[in-house]
Image (cartoon, rainbow, N blue to C red):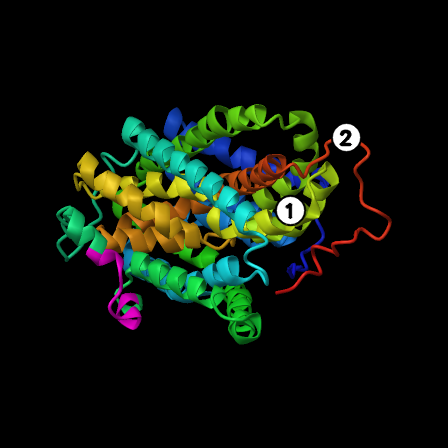
Amino acid sequence: MEQTNTKASPSMTLREQMPVWIVVGIALFVNFLTFGLHILPEIVASIARWVGLAGLAYLSYRRGSVTTWILFALVFGAEVGHTFPAGAEWYSVLSKIFIKLIKTIVAPLLFGTLLVGIAGHSDIKSVGRMGIKALIYFEVVTTIALIIGLAAINFTKAGVGLPQMPTTEALPELRKPMSGPEIVLHTFPDNVIKSISEGEILQIVVFCLLFAIAMTQVSYERRRPFLVFAESLSEIMFKFTNIIMYFAPFGVGGAIAYTVAKLGLGVFANLGMLLLTLYGALIVFILGVLLPIALFFRIPIRRFLKYVSEPLTIAFATTSSEAALPKALENMEKMGVSRRVVSFVLPTGLSFNLDGSTLYLSLAAVFVAQAANIHMPIGAQITMLVTLMLTTKGIAGVSRASLVILTGTAASFGLPDWPIAAILGIDALMDMGRTATNTLGNCLATAIVGQWEGETDFSDKISLNPEGSNAEGSILDSKV
């Protein structure tokens, strides 16, 4: 797995940052005096905010990461939308461009990742038993995550009351739930190109699954060229996504500026509730699901946390499961899981076991319906959950990839795009939590499958040799 290294500006020490944070603090205090106590005129508060934004822009420049710029764009866009509401339509163009670019990734991303994940092992029979166990675990845990997300958003109703986005077009109505035979028939594509053009993600997934299974039925020499192509396609789509993410600050800034220009700053009450709902649901999932599972399989919690903390930090900071994968591969072997298990479960989990992303998707999809004031009966929500159970298995572990599935799911169920544009404003904050949960769940799945297979030794005797390899060969050097 190739790890992308981005050259960043030298980080600032806390002492260097302190003057900027003092200026930002003064700006906040001035605005409190203006809007809270009504002591100062609004022009003073406005000047203070722009001075504070200049300080934050300097910090973002010194930090040099896309995530930092996205967070800055969130604040900057809110101020631009509040101060210059007349430019709302132009702000909307930026967010729409970003969403369009995200949508172009769907089909090739699913095709490449699913083919490599399923048909990418030279001897499918040797990993069959372990693969079945891993996939059963993935399916059970991610389904629980979907249910928790669905329950959380129905409990908090974070999208209810979100001011409706002014539009010249009528909002699409929720499609009537299909009957059982219609659901089964609609699952299978009659023309994969048509499925791609119409954004039918479930049909694309079914085609990729069948194609990958068919590949395993031919000799390795026959399928190898296509595997190389699929692996190359996956890597290219990773880079394609990274390129698009450089436009993300503009998309986020435009989305939040348009939202504030049209709806006012009160919209943040709903978005803040969505953010709290997500993090609360993630905490419930970690403590209520992952922790009991770890205890049941006798995973040493302290040892596990020791080795998972570094990849977890990388995932949280970069919002990319892929970026955390090399360190996770190394650390899980150091923890005491056999190389055979680690090299299979972690990469496979990158597409099939994204707990945080699946929880987020069920939560965000219902939020979109609530925001659009479209009532989704429990039957329709269950139908959506079943769809997400399959479509989430094709998510690649790259930054903001969940947005790909969310936009496709919304289109499939006749939901509008504008609430997704509103979600864009806080997507960077949500992505940190869900990506860290993805990595945590993947590392735990590796330890559990290792225990299940009897291929773990959690004593301190397990360690890498000086070359970092054993008779099975290096994980990072293994190729299709």
Q: Position of residue 143 (x, y in %)?
A: 39, 38
Residue at point 15% right, 49% down? 178
Q: Is residue 153 above or below residue 174?
A: above
Residue 460 appears in view? yes
Q: Is residue 447 left or right of residue 139?
A: right
Identify the residue at horizontal 28%, vertical 40% (top origin): 366
Q: Which mark is residue 459?
A: 2
Q: Amino acid at mark 1?
A: Val
Q: Residue at x 51, y 57 (%)?
A: 117
* Residue 188 in the image, given as x and y percentages of width and height: 26, 60
Quarter of the image containing the N terminus?
bottom right
In space, the residues marked 1 and 2 are separated at their CA atoms by: 17 Å
**Depth order, front residue of 218/280:** 218
> x%, y% of residue 325?
62, 50
**Number of marks in the rendered image:** 2
Dot label at residue 292: none
Type of secondary structure dominating the magenta stretch: helix
- Residue 382 versus residue 104 in the image, above or below: above
Say what secondary structure mark 1 lies in.
helix
Instruction: Single out the residue that lies furthest toward the right.
Output: 466
Query: Quick check: is 110 in the magenta stretch?
Result: no
Q: Secondary structure at mark 2?
A: loop
Q: What is the magenta range?
A: 185-195
Of callouts 1 and 2, which one flags the residue occurring earlier in the amino acid sequence? 1
Q: Amino acid at mark 2?
A: Ser
The image quadrant where one finds the C terminus is bottom right
Viewer-side residue, 59 vs 234: 234
Q: Which mark is residue 342?
A: 1
